[in-house]
Amino acid sequence: MRFLDDTLALWGVTGTAQSAESPLVASIPAADGSTISIGPATEGPFRWLVHVPGRRPRPCASLVGVLSALRGALGVERGNAVRVVPPSTPLRYAQDERDSSFVRAERSETQSKPEQPQAIPVTVITGFLGSGKTTLLGRLLRDPAMGRAAVIINEFGEIPLDHELIETGDESFVQLSNGCLCCKVRSDLTLTLSDLASRRAAGTVPPFERAVIETSGLADPAPILHALMTDDGLSGVYALDRVVTTVDALTGLSTLDAHPESLRQAAVADRIVLTKTDVPGADPRALAQRIGAINPEAPVLTATYGDIAASALFDGDTRAPSLRAHSHAGEHEHSAGITSFTLTRDQPVHGVALALFLSALAENCGADLLRVKGLVQVTEEPSRPAVIHGVQHVYHAPVWLDGWPSNDRRTRIVFIGRNVRRPWVQALLELLEAEVGEEDRRYPGEGRDPAPV
C-alpha cells in the first residue's frame, strides 16, 4: 500500500489506498466518490485487473499498465512514455488491445547493423541572466580548439565579433578568423540546426565538427535537450554531448532560491562553471556546496572573466557519470521542492525491467523528474555497465561502456526532480524487477514465445 500511497502523492491526488480482502489487492477512492479496485487476473497472460465503476475491467500485463490505468481513471496527466531498449539485450513488444509491454527477444550475435555516419556532438551552454555565459562564450571563441565548431547564439549582437569576421555568407551566418562558424537562432532552433547540417553537407559552410548552443538567461534548457534527443530530422545528424551551466558566485545562492529556472539549469548540467569568483562578496565555496547537493555528478569549475580552456568543457567522456557520493543515506531537498538522491542496488537489473523502469519514470513523473543519470549493472551484460541519461520524460537509449570505470559494480543512479521521492523510485524498480524475475521463472530460457511482462 505504501507504494500506491506514494504514487498518489507524486500525482498530487488526495486519497489513500486501502487493503482489501482477497482476491482484491487494493482499493482507491476517486474524486466522484466511487472506488477503483485492483486485483489479480485469473486467466490469460495478464497479471492484474483494474476495476473502474461503469467501465469494463482493464487487464494489465505489468505494474506499468496498472499505473497507466489508474492515471486514466483518476484523470492524471503526466509525461508521455518513451520506451528505451538496451542495445545489447534486444527487446520486442507484445501487444494486446490495451497494453504494450517489453518482452526479451532471443539475442543474435551475428546480427549486423549498417554503418552510420558519426553524429555531430552538441554542447548546450545555459545559465541565468547575468551569470556570465555570454562572456564565457566570447572567450571560448578565441580558443583555437573552437576552430571547427558551429556556435548558435540567441542574440548575435551580444558578442562583439566584428573585428574577427573574415566572411559573411548571409545575414545569419558568419565565419570567424579562427574558422569557427557562428549564427543566430532563427524562428526555431530545430530549423537552424537542420539548415546548418544541410549547408555542411553541401559544402557551403565549413565542415564543423561540433555545435555549441547558447540559451537565453531565462530559458528552461529541457525543450532544447528534448529536440536534440527526439526530433526525427536531427536524429543521427546531431547527438547531445553535454550541458554546461554558468552560475554567478556573487548572486548564485539567492538566484537558486528565487528562480526555479536557475535550479533547472543547474540540475541538468554535466559541467558547472562558477563565474565572478574574484568579485568581493562572492562565496564560491558555499555555492559549490549548494550545487553539489543539487547536482552531485557535475564537476564544478571556475572561470574569471570567462577565461577557461575549451578542453575543460568539451574534452572527456560524459557517458560515465562521476556519481560523487553525497546522499546515499538520504535525499536532499532544495527550494521549489527540488530533491536529489542517489539510488544504489547491489543486484543486477534485468534488461526488460530497466526498460520498463525508464518508461514508468517518464509516464508517472513527467516534467517533475528533471534529470536522471547513472550506471546500471544489467543481468544480461554484468561485465560492462549501461549508462542511462534522461531529461524529464525523454531518455537516451542506454550506452554500453567497454568495462566498469572502477571496482564498484553496483547500480548507481542519480535522480534530480521536483517532489520525486526515493522510496517511490526504489519500490518501483524493485517491484518491476520482481515481476520480470517471476516471468523468467515462468518462461525459462531464451527465444520463448512472446508473453506480456
Image (cartoon, rainbow, N blue to C red):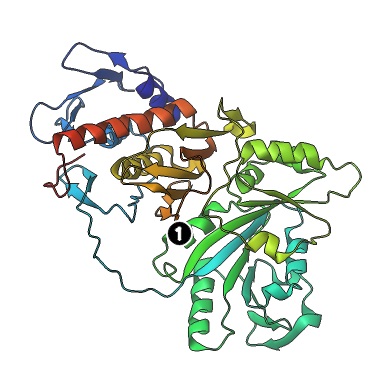
Q: Residue 42's x, y, as percent?
A: 10, 26
Task: Residue at the far left: name it.
Answer: 43
Q: Residue 199's x, y, as percent?
A: 52, 83
Task: Residue at the far front: name it.
Answer: 407
Q: Is residue 266 left or right of residue 233?
A: right
Query: Relative to the observer, which residue lies in front, 303 or 188?
Result: 303
* Secondary structure of the residue carrying numbered label 1: helix
Q: Residue 50's x, y, as percent?
A: 21, 28
At 31% across and 19% down in the image, what residue appears? 29
Q: Residues within 10 Å of mark 1 (few under 14, many from 20)?
A: many
Q: Which residue is mark 1?
A: 229
At 63% across and 41% down in the image, what residue appears? 260
At 58% across and 46% down in the image, what residue appears? 322
Task: Residue at the far right: name it.
Answer: 280
Q: Residue 242's x, y, as percent?
A: 57, 58
Query: Relative to the observer, which residue lies in front, 403 or 197?
Result: 403
- Whether residue 109 is visible to the viewer of this picture, yes or no, is yes
- Which quadrant of the figure has residue 236? bottom left
The amino acid on which the numbered mark 1 sits, given as a three-letter code, is Met
Query: Relative to the observer, which residue lies in front, 346 or 417?
Result: 346
Q: Is residue 117 left or right of residue 140?
A: left
Q: Is residue 411 left or right of residue 168?
A: left
Residue 305 in the image: above or below residue 322: below
Query: Image quadrant for the N terminus?
Result: top left
Query: Relative to the observer, which residue lies in front, 172 or 360?
Result: 360
Residue 40 in the image: above or below residue 277: above
